[in-house]
Image (spheres, grey):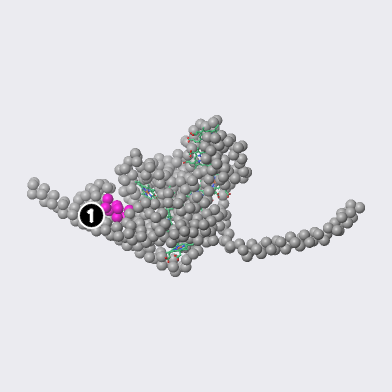
Amino acid sequence: MGAPVRRISRCAPCRGRVSVTLLGAAAGLFAAVFFVLIFLPWRPVGELPPVAVQPVHRVDPRLDRCAACHRRVTPGIVEQWAESTHARRGVTCRDCHQVAEASPYAQAHVGTHISTTVTPRVCGQCHARVTEEFSQSRHSLPAWASLTGTRDFARDPRLMALWSETSHPPPDPGLVLSSRIALHDLEGPGVTPLACESCHEIGRPNLDGSAGSCSKCHLRHRFNLEQVRRPETCTLCHAGPDQPQAEIFAQSPHGVIYATQEHLYHFSQVTGRLGVDDFPAPTCQICHLSGFGGQQTTHDVGERLSWYLQMPIARHRPEHEAGRAAMREVCRQCHSTDFIGRQFDAADQVVAWTNARIEEANAILAGLIRERIIPPGDFSDPLHHLAFNLWHYGGRAARFGAFMQGPAFTQWSGLYPLMRDLDNLRRGASEARRRAEQVSAEAAAGG
Ligand code: HEC
Ligand code: HEC
Ligand code: HEC
Ligand code: HEC
Ligand code: HEC
Ligand code: HEC
Ligand code: HEC
Ligand code: HEC
């Protein structure tokens, strides 16, 4: 009986202190909420992407057997990995490199089997949704098919199934890609590994039935968001005369803001929460890939596009309206609906202008081939080169410049060279016809 009394009596003197403490805590909490509401910038709280994550413990690099030895063998790799979210979440060297003995990539290694190649199938064990989106995009198998058609993977039914699931297939690939496949073959395997393949490897066929390489963008072994969100990551491949997106972006107002006010960008912000307070102007990623405003992150870089701009004659994509709407939704975070409408209308005009001229060029070339004035094989006559340059450089630079705010490219790498090359093609065709008539007249006279 005495105990509760004692407790009460012991508590009696401190009751006042308890209520003071409680009151203080409540006031503190209120103040904290108030400050958070007033001073924190508003962020749209997007849904965090589902990641099928198993390991959750932090790995001590000294205790992990692979890492412990590799700390001496390849210290740079262990250092990069140790700083990664992967290491913090318990993803180890083994999760990405250890394979069954039966794996086509298996090599014996200190009592186990490892693979140096890490395919999207491996990443996909934990990042299923991302991997599926990537596999459907033109960054996957279509990028490889651009070099050799389907011949490198036609024998693997798993890869053929992936190929047929691509959301943005190049329409009639045989016809559309033939000149580039011819170019790849003409240059030959001695030199193309350091040329075409270095970029198109992003969609290489893998021996485990998957395609592509995530680490073409996610440079190992930090795999951090800041690196992959910087536009330089895209410009590894998206640069040069036939796809001058790097150069166009650099000269666009968006690129200028990036170059001059980089300190305002929050490249490490949590995925799904990026907003205008993190990015004052868009980078390649914000427009094409990142979750931003109303758009979810997508690894299908074709999802927000309406045209196949890269084709000789640009065509609408099957889902062009949805693609256009998704892209406009990105612009809408910073520009008015009418402003955006005018930009897209004007860019569509540039597409129509280039298409009309490239159609004329194609007709000229087809006529010469039909009349047997020039041989049909790709690049078998200077006029083939001229017709190729005309759309591959002029036509594409004009279209890309128009949609990505690069007037110097629209005009001086685009419209003007296209016009000049078309004029040269017209003259070249008349000249070739005249020569052919002369030759047949001489043959008739001689015979
Ligand atoms: C006792 C030391 C040791 C241990 C343990 C060890 N490795 Fe290695 N590993 C090496 C050495 C040495 C090389 C060769 C380095 C070189 O060529 O410069 C190597 C190479 C590699 C390579 C590159 C192979 C290539 O062909 O390029 C990978 C990947 C690799 N190890 C992963 C692992 C994984 C995963 C584990 C744990 C299952 C592991 N290692 C455990 C010593 C070790
Ligand atoms: C999240 C997955 C992942 C983890 C974890 C990982 N790697 Fe890798 N590693 C890769 C990828 C991707 C490549 C590039 C493979 C390719 O080109 O297909 C690679 C390549 C390598 C290579 C060969 C290329 C080179 O630069 O020498 C070595 C060696 C290597 N990793 C060692 C390690 C070690 C050691 C660890 C642990 C400390 C580790 N990796 C952890 C994904 C991973
Ligand atoms: C064994 C499971 C596993 C594998 C295999 C794996 N990851 Fe991860 N990855 C994770 C986990 C867990 C996280 C942390 C997710 C989180 O915190 O929300 C993560 C996070 C990431 C992130 C975000 C990093 C950050 O700092 O926010 C990237 C990018 C990533 N992984 C890429 C890859 C790539 C590319 C591969 C294949 C080369 C790969 N992962 C393989 C489990 C894995
Ligand atoms: C610097 C990196 C890089 C190199 C080198 C490269 N490409 Fe590409 N290629 C790209 C990019 C990026 C695209 C996407 C362009 C687009 O969609 O606007 C592309 C698109 C293509 C396409 C599809 C669009 C089209 O033209 O119809 C084909 C085909 C192609 N490349 C073939 C080749 C061939 C063949 C070679 C070598 C002779 C090669 N590429 C070299 C980066 C490269
Ligand atoms: C390793 C090289 C490489 C890197 C890095 C790369 N790309 Fe690509 N990209 C390509 C190639 C190659 C193609 C063309 C595929 C084909 O031939 O069909 C392409 C195509 C595209 C397309 C056109 C997709 C379609 O459906 O037509 C977009 C958009 C794109 N890339 C955006 C990006 C962005 C954004 C980044 C950076 C986050 C990036 N790429 C990084 C090589 C690359
Ligand atoms: C302001 C937003 C924006 C930025 C920034 C931007 N793009 Fe684009 N991009 C577009 C639009 C809009 C299109 C044309 C969309 C369509 O087809 O309707 C486009 C088209 C493309 C295409 C052509 C796809 C095809 O059909 O051939 C590629 C490739 C591409 N962008 C890559 C990049 C890269 C790489 C960067 C950064 C260096 C970049 N973009 C920066 C908005 C942007
Ligand atoms: C064209 C470049 C590119 C390629 C290729 C690429 N990624 Fe990414 N990835 C990005 C960018 C950019 C982000 C940041 C997205 C954002 O800002 O919302 C990202 C984010 C991620 C994240 C963290 C966010 C999330 O949605 O979970 C993971 C995990 C990831 N990538 C895994 C992969 C895997 C696995 C592959 C290969 C199947 C891959 N990536 C291929 C550019 C790429
Ligand atoms: C995160 C904000 C943001 C997004 C998203 C964005 N922009 Fe911009 N944009 C800017 C800023 C900031 C400027 C520079 C201010 C200026 O030029 O008045 C700019 C400038 C421009 C300009 C030049 C304006 C002028 O008057 O010269 C055009 C055109 C443009 N943007 C088009 C687009 C299109 C099209 C999209 C979507 C594909 C887009 N922007 C997405 C922020 C954005």
Residue at point 52% right, 58% down? 264
User: Which residue of the protein is positioned furthest toward the right in this rendering?
Assistant: 1
Please say whether residue 165 is one of the residues in the magenta stretch: no
Q: Which residue is mark 1?
A: 367
Residue drawn 25% across the image and 54% down it: 365
Tell me the kind of residue under disc 1. Gly
143 vs 427, left or right, is: right
Let me know if residue 390 is in the magenta part.
Answer: yes
Question: In the displayed structure, would residue 407 be above or below residue 216?
Answer: below
Residue 227 horizontal side relative to residue 26, left or right? left
Q: In the image, residue 216 lies at what x, y percent?
A: 46, 46
Q: Nearer the viewer, residue 40 or 161?
A: 40
Q: Residue furthest front?
A: 260
Where does the magenta region start and end? 385-392
The front one of 79 and 275 is 79
Label 1 crowd bin: few (<14), some (14–19), many (20+), radius 10 Å: some
- Look at 23% across and 54% down and name the residue there: 367
Residue 137 visible in this rendered orientation of the protein: no
Q: Residue 148 in the image: state x and y as whole percent.
A: 36, 44
